[in-house]
Amino acid sequence: MVFNTVLDCRQFPNPLFFKNYLDAMRFLTTSILICFLMAFQSCYADEARDQADQAIEQVNIFRKNLAAHQYIEIYNQSSDNLKKSVSKYEFIKFLGDASEKFGAFNSANLQQTTIMRWFMVGAPIIKLTYFSKYSNATMHEYFTFITEDNKTVLLSYSIKGKIISNDEREKINIAKQAVADIRNKIAAHQYIELYKSSSRRMQNIMSEDAFMKFMNGASKDLGPLRSATLTNEEFIAKDKRIVLTYNSDYWNITTDEYFVFLIEDDKVVFGGYQYTKD
């Protein structure tokens, strides 16, 4: 009865009532749709997190099989789409060559997780990007997974990185050891000594007074060091330069630090320091 009364415009000479009713219906419909979408999004988010966790676990299994040279096992556990795009021989050769060049796996940092819907097959796609360190190389690894028969399986694997020679690796290790000495000098405010031991190139660019001013400002910004984790190492051959990146937790802030070293007279010397500040 109420519904009929609302629809009967003759009982309400003011046409605005009818207009307001339509607006109310539109609002109600929109609200229901929004609630539905929010509920769907919540369910999808939970599902996406579960699938991302499964993909990360599959990466761990991939690494174990790669270290054990179980290339056939990796191929057999991969998706049907991967097997259609590359033969078993090509896949095994690719992994074998990569494993030989890269050396032993050291560590990896998950940098990005992307989840998409592949509407052609109705299955979610999970893309994981890692910055990885091997004994002979540093690189970005790109893993793509898809769900088939309720299982998360490998869809593709690709790499982008640089092979590090034995000489470059040796110089990077020297630079890592030098970072500890530099930190000790910074903690003791021995900035003049640090400056005098730096590269000729840095001293040509920055005066001793400018370096002292910069380091005093850094000391005030940062405070005492709590902990530091090496997140990236790079050897730039054309510039004869090494850049070590640390994520460091200081008393005042957490920051990314960049220690630069230059190769001068075939020696690794301190060439610069930088830190991020919000």
Image (cartoon, rainbow, N blue to C red):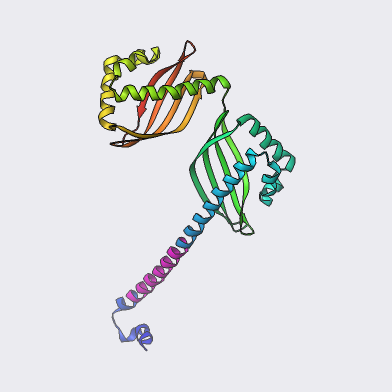
Q: Quadrant of residue 182?
A: top left
Q: Is residue 22 magenta?
A: yes
Residue 268 location (% of width, % of height)? 45, 17
Q: Is residue 67 left or right of residue 255?
A: right
Instruction: Indicate whether 222 appears above or below 191.
Output: below
Q: Residue at x 45, y 64 (%)?
A: 37
For image coordinates 43% across by 63% down, the residue present is 38
- Main secondary-structure element of the magenta-colored stretch: helix
Question: In the depicted view, which residue is nearer to us: 202 or 67?
Answer: 67
Q: Which residues are magenta?
A: 20-41
**Closer to the camera in the image, 254 or 47:** 254
Q: Nearer the viewer, residue 64 or 195?
A: 64
- Identity of the residue drawn at 67% across and 47% down: 82
Instruction: Please identify the quarter of the rendering in which residue 260 is found.
Output: top left
Looking at the image, residue 24 sits to the left or right of residue 168; the answer is: left
Q: Nearer the viewer, residue 40 or 250?
A: 250
Vertical side of 273 occupied by 8: above or below = below
Q: Residue at x 62, y 48 (%)?
A: 154
